Image (spheres, helix red, strand yellow):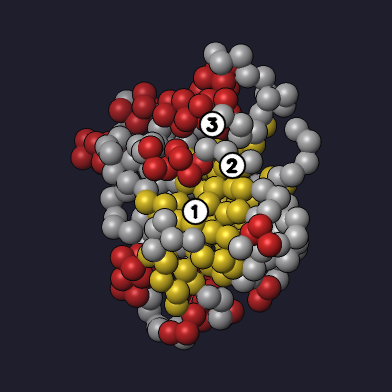
Amino acid sequence: MASEKSSCPITITPLFSGSSGNAILVSTEDTRILVDAGMNCKKIVEALNMVRINPFDLNAILITHDHSDHISGLDVFTRKFSIPIYATRDTWSGIHRAEKKPHLPSLDYEIIPEQSFSIGNFDIIAFDTPHDTTGSCGYCFSTVSNRAAIATDIGYMTPVIFDHLKGCDGILLEANYDKDMLWNGEYPYYLKKRIDGNNGHLCNDDCASTIAALCKAGTKHFILGHLSKENNLPQVAERTVIRALEEEDLIRDKDFTLRIANRYVPTEPLMLGGSL
């Protein structure tokens, strides 16, 4: 368990984030985990090289769900580097349907939400997320030093998700769309309804109110992720969140830090454990 391990500060490094593809590196000095592999193998390798990580040094890949922007590079990447993969049972069904060639069965690990498991320095727990595919989940990573979480592709903020996020030192949370941009945009009605529904994505307003509540509960570091290219802008999402925090008399770089995950290239790593 993490309590038996030495001090292990956590670093969160988004490699890509958005509907174009998602991959996030969560690491300590000795353990490196990739969350999702939603770009092609070549681009994932290039991004890892940019942050000075050899793909062969990854301990595991954790998959949040089986949509293509989260698994499109998994098939080739896994066969090339033989990295163990962790996913829920329903997500595994989707992964196997999407793969063009089978990889080694010994690399497959099935996880169950709310049941803790360990990889290297991390104790990890998956939690259910409401999205329009079965088996969708987020992840909470704990060491003796820090706690971090990844939560994207969320139709709405459930009490279960909030309880897992509460008390984390750092969180990557979805800010997918601006409601006005979505409903005044060019998407067909059925797609707008899907995105804005309880099994779609988290809007800027709901992300902002969640971050304000989490910050008041003690979380200091936030990354906004999975922004829509068509229905959001980084400055719009950032402004919405900052406004919600300022309404609670919370001051940026004093009470919290906030950054936006880049869509196509690695974002500056968020290193937990230091002073604000």
Q: Residue at x 32, y 26 (%)?
A: 184
Q: Residue at x 66, y 76 (%)?
A: 56
Q: Position of residue 255 (x, y in %)?
A: 68, 25
Query: Residue 139 bears which disc, if any?
Result: 1
Cβ–Cβ under 8 Å for marks 2 and 1: no
Quadrant position of residue 176: top left
Q: What's the residue type where badge 2 is placed?
A: Cys
Report which residue position mark 2 lands on.
Answer: 168
Q: What's the residue type where badge 3 is placed?
A: Leu
Q: Is residue 85 left or right of residue 66?
A: right
Q: CA distance from mark 1 to mark 3?
A: 16 Å
Asked if 274 appears above or below 13 in the picture, the reply is: above
Q: Is residue 122 left or right of residue 154?
A: right
Task: Name, please, the residue furthest toward the front.
Answer: 4
Report which residue position mark 3 lands on.
Answer: 214
Quadrant position of residue 114: bottom left
Q: CA distance from mark 2 to mark 1?
A: 12 Å
Q: Position of residue 39 (x, y in %)?
A: 51, 61
Q: Position of residue 195 (x, y in %)?
A: 31, 39
Mark 3 is surrounded, within 10 Å at the Cα level, by few (under 14), some (14 to 19) or many (20 or more) other residues, namely: many
Q: Is residue 253 left or right of residue 127?
A: right
Q: Residue at x 62, y 48 (%)?
A: 147
Query: Residue 162 bears which disc, if any?
Result: none
User: Which badge, 1 or 3, is on the more N-terminal residue?
Assistant: 1
Residue 54 seen:
yes
Q: CA distance from mark 3 to mark 2?
A: 9 Å
Q: How many marks?
A: 3
